[in-house]
Amino acid sequence: MPDLASPDIAVPLPPGAHAPAPVHDVASAVAALEEDIVLNRLHPRERLTEDELMQRFGLKRHAVRDVLAELTRLGLAERRKNVGAEVRSFTVREVMELYAVRELLETEAARQVPCPPAPEDLQRLIDVQRQHDAAVAAEDPRAVFRTNLAFHQTLFGLCENLVLQKAIQEYARQTHSIRFSTLVSADYRSRARHEHWQMIEALRQGQREVLVALCREHITPSRDGYLAANRHLQEG
């Protein structure tokens, strides 16, 4: 999967832009910070301070601590001794291991989905992909991120193993912060869109092994892009 978060107060807004209104609840704050991380408004090892988050989201300190705890649980943030909470960064080994698990899970799901699926299920996937096409054409990274997630959730949702579906979503979320290097690339967005349509066609034609191969190859660019872009952190 191309490999399916709103700006932190420490990040300057573009000229003419307005600060978003406070969201006033933990779930919305977590979703906003998740997008910040994916869209590189927050960078690996950037600090997430309670005071700044309280000011940005209009939350009490105990609620902000819940936000940070949830980001940590989701694998998007981490706590470092004498530093506090910060955006999670990954070692080479962590990246390789996470993506190895994703490959196992997603290729196994591709082996289990009905191939071809029921016509209404295939049409639902096509409809989601058309939304992704529109987001790519509009060059809207936030919409690309969300519609990409929707495509893969719909695809793997065809697998009847609910535990496998949940595991795929969990490990995909843990790699959200790895995806930015490819999300911002117009060439990669175009490639991902094309690969999505190849997956749809493989499903339509009942070509399971083609689908499995596409799912395997689809996730590697974000892995490799992150490792290249953050080599300085890994060396440090």
Image (cartoon, rainbow, N blue to C red):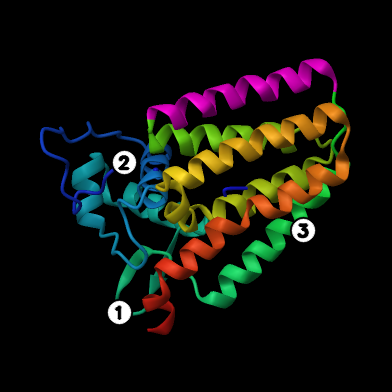
Does 129 sit above or below residue 166?
A: above
Q: Is residue 90 left or right of residue 163?
A: left
Q: Which residues are magenta?
A: 118-138
Q: Say which of marks 3 and 2 sits in front.
A: 3
Q: Residue furthest bottom?
A: 236
SS state under label 2? loop
**Which residue has dot 1 on it?**
82
Q: Indicate the quadrant where residue 15 lies.
A: top left
Magenta span: chief secondary structure: helix
Query: What residue is at 77 percent from the left and 21 percent from the top?
Result: 121
Q: What whole-number distance in Å separates the C-alpha atoms at marks 3 and 2?
A: 32 Å
120 left or right, relative to 134? right
| Amino acid marked by disc 3 | Leu
Q: Are marks 2 and 1 in contact (CB under 8 Å)?
A: no
Q: Quadrant of the C terminus?
A: bottom left
Q: Which residue is mark 2?
A: 6
**Type of the residue with mark 2:** Ser
Near mark 2 (Cα within 10 A), the count class, few <14, some 14-19 or many ≥20, is: many
Which numbered circle lies on residue 31?
A: none
Residue 127 image offset from top left, x and y in percent? 63, 19
Q: Mark 1 is on which residue type?
A: Asn
> Of the residues under marks 3 and 2, which one precedes in the sequence?
2
Q: Which residue is mark 3?
A: 104
The answer to whether residue 4 is visible is: no
> Which residue is at a point 79% across and 42% down the rendered structure image?
211
Tell me residue 161's x, y (percent): 83, 41
